[in-house]
Image (cartoon, rainbow, N blue to C red):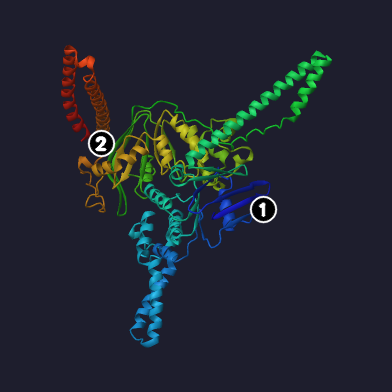
Amino acid sequence: MILACHNLDKSFGDRVIVRQGSFHIEEREKTALVGINGAGKSTILKMIIGEEPLDGGEVTLARGKTLGYLAQHQNLLPGGTIYEELKSARADIFEMEQRIRSIELELQSLTGRELESRLETYNRLQSEFESRNGYACESEIVGVLKGLGFSEDDFSKKTDTLSGGQKTRVALGRLLLTNPDILLLDEPTNHLDLNSIAWLETYLINYPGAVFIVSHDRYFLNRVVTKVVEIENGEIRTYAGNYKAYSAKKQQIRDARLKEYFNQQREIRHQQAVIEKLKSFNREKSIRRAESREKMLEKITPLEKPADAAPEMHFTLEPSCISGNDVLTVDHLSKQFDNQVLFQDVSFEIRRGEHIAIIGDNGTGKTTLLKILNQVVPADNGTFTLGAKVKIGYYDQEHHVLHDDKTIFDEISDAYPSLNNTQIRNTLAAFQFTGDEVFQEIRSLSGGEKGRVSLAKLMLSEANFLILDEPTNHLDIASKEILEEALNNYSGTLLYVSHDRYFINSTASRILELVNQTFVNYIGNYDYYLEKKEELTRAYASVPADVRTPVHADSGNKTGDSRLSWQEQKEQQAKERKRKNDLRKTEDEISRLEKRNAQIDHEMTLEEVYSNSVRCQELASEHAENEEKLAGLYELWETLAE
């Protein structure tokens, strides 16, 4: 056991964070800490590192073990570069290398015992440097930086100039390189693109120490962790397995407790009714029986009803009218900023009812595309056309559609003046804003709260084409699941950008990946995308030789092969499904005929058969006919398998 938390108590005024909470983490164990927003997850991490004082209980780190902590907000040392920041994590290795180089210079002028003494020091340092993998230190730093999505051009950037997300990635890289015995990570996948998240998953799965993670990324938790610690209503419970196993077990336990509670309540009501009936007979014998039952009833220990889950959002998304079949047509669209080409000459179509996710690395232009479609920024070249009766509802991850100086109530009231006071309050209550909370100013809200206000406006818009930019950012897992359900029941058309793979898997029927300045189309969810990524990227988005050159006004002559052809790929994938189906049928028929011929061979050895010439001839003919069919089926199977 590397970390033990025993009987933790923590409150802020009347608000209880944790009460008598206990859990432990074993060496090399990968553990998640889960709970709704505001449950106290980050507070528990701060209690473990000593940043937040305990009201009671104790935190014990095994003797001689080190602990590393990644907070959600970072303060890096001013003036340094990204590379220098990560290099500081291995400062002792680089200092050791400097000492070795210094001694090498000294050795040239030393003799006798002095030389022997310095050689002894030199050999000791060399051995330690090698054992600590000093020769691979710089390549390891480069590997971590690239894994977290930084290019070599980024290495020299000053940390003072970085965004909050970039600073978090730098801090994460620095922490990973320190190799503590236990890593405490608070939302490590925030600000990472899909490739970087996949890299981090692999890194943590193979990490030689223990890891304790706070995250709302269910796909990430399913891949990495083997234990889940849950904090709910101030209580801590531990579950074995990944997030999926935890979620199923939690529901089973709640259902069992609820059933037990209702069964006991039903039995109590039954006994009370019987007692009342016996007393109503007003006879000595029946009164004694009633009293006997009352004594039995008093011995029952009442079960507590399982606590209801925390208040959740509840909403539906319904369009006010049905759009035409062709919702969006994009023709030869291009966009660049200065000399950075985001995408060029891209064309695709969206049909009514499709649920499409746009994915790709950070900085490739996904959000820019959504802004072009919402006419927030102009395209450099190309056009897009909306279909008949298309009404857009836009969710902006930066919440520019909200007004900082307004209250939540006024934000809804001004956007939808036909709603009365009760209707507005009912709408906001569905998004967890009640009482005086509706009069909070937008500027005072957290990212998650702003997200809920934006979702409320989106619901009221009754749009038939939703365009969403990172809709799950700042939402806890329970809220994500509610949003997923609302979108899956939505009858309109959906186009969104997301890095949440679980969310994509649950809601997308088609994926557009922005890679190498073009879009690659996948007709399926995220699991299908992973299966086909390499094949389709090679076919439709291989890196051109002039990938970094600016787009000029006449750059709309890109060859048809590299453009996205929705219909072509749909036809190809239909053919592939037919091929697999035919292959399966062929294998089944081969198996059936082979089994039948084996059965015939056996029958021919039986006396009642081989002594019957007519039966023997029938079986021999059937065997020969089957062999002829098998020869053709083997050839067909080979063709289909290739």
Question: How dense is the environment of label 2, judged by Cα within 10 Å: few (below 14), some, or many (20 and up)?
Answer: some
The secondary structure type at the circle numbered 2 is loop
Residue linked to disc 1: 56
Residue linked to disc 2: 565
From the top left corner, tell me how far across and down residue 92 is, in percent.
44, 69
The amino acid sitting under disc 2 is: Ser
Question: How dense is the environment of label 1, judged by Cα within 10 Å: few (below 14), some, or many (20 and up)?
Answer: some
Between disc 1 and disc 2, the foreground one is 1
Residue depicted at x 18% and y 14%:
618
From the top left corner, tell me how far across and down residue 388 is, in percent.
35, 28
Q: Quadrant of the C terminus?
A: top left
The mark tally for this picture is 2
Alpha carbon of mark 1 to alpha carbon of mark 2: how far? 63 Å
Q: Is residue 493 above or below residue 336?
A: above
Residue depicted at x 23% and y 44%:
556
The amino acid sitting under disc 1 is: Gly
The part of the image, by quadrant, that contains residue 324 is top left
Asked if labels 2 and 1 touch by Cβ distance under 8 angstroms, the answer is: no
Q: Is residue 404 above or below residue 248?
A: below
The part of the image, by quadrant, that contains residue 579 is top left
Observer-nearest residue: 429 or 510? 510
